[in-house]
Amino acid sequence: MFRPMSCLLVPALLAAAPMPKVLSPAATVQRQIERFNAHDLEGYLALFVEDLEVADLPASPWGTRTKAWLRGVYAERFRTNPDLRASTEAQMVSGAFVIERERIQGRAGRRDRWMWWWSIR
């Protein structure tokens, strides 16, 4: 027997089901700042691929690093710098690229620092 209400209910449930959200490159970088400021190490690391390129521009490239390396660096920074925070000062988005100037504050014994971030999705 055909039940019209059942046919209507399935599409309604599908429409109400949460869809996985794919963030834009700019939103991904914003989420990175939010998790950094919350000192949410695991949430912060979740935004990075396993093998990443790291460089101290324009000085020198550090080369490929792993998420395990990043975990060690930021676990220590968050532990020793409870006031560590970042804020966006300027941002330029071009397709999958985000170039952002961030102000880093709260590193013990260091002055505020400006950094550029390049994010490729």
Image (tube, helix red, strand yellow):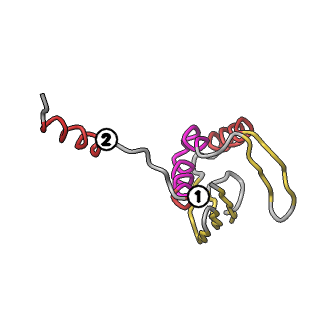
Out of 49 and 62, give the one closest to the viewer.
Answer: 49
**Residue type pointed to by label 2:** Ala
Task: Tell me where residue 3 appears, x and y as whole percent.
Answer: 12, 33
Which residue bears the numbered disc 2?
17
Out of 110 and 114, give the one closest to the viewer.
Answer: 114
Placement of 108 over or under 72, stated as above or below: below
Placement of 68 over or under 49, stated as above or below: above
Q: Quadrant of the N terminus?
A: top left
Task: Tell me where residue 60 appears, x and y as whole percent.
Answer: 87, 58
Q: Residue at x 71, y 54 (%)?
A: 109
The magenta region covers 28-46
Mark 2–mark 1 Cα distance, whole angstroms, equals: 34 Å
Q: Quadrant of the C terminus?
A: bottom right
Placement of 9 over or under 29, stated as above or below: above
Q: Residue furthest right?
A: 60
Mark identifier at residue 86: 1
Task: Tell me where residue 71 appears, x and y as whole percent.
Answer: 68, 38
Q: Residue at x 53, y 48 (%)?
A: 35
Mark 2 or mark 1: whose residue is earlier in sequence: 2
User: Regarding mark 1 in the picture, which secondary structure is present there?
Assistant: strand
Q: Quadrant of residue 18?
A: top left
Pointer 2 local density, CA inside 10 Å: few below 14, some 14–19, many at least 20: few
Q: Residue at x 65, y 38 (%)?
A: 75
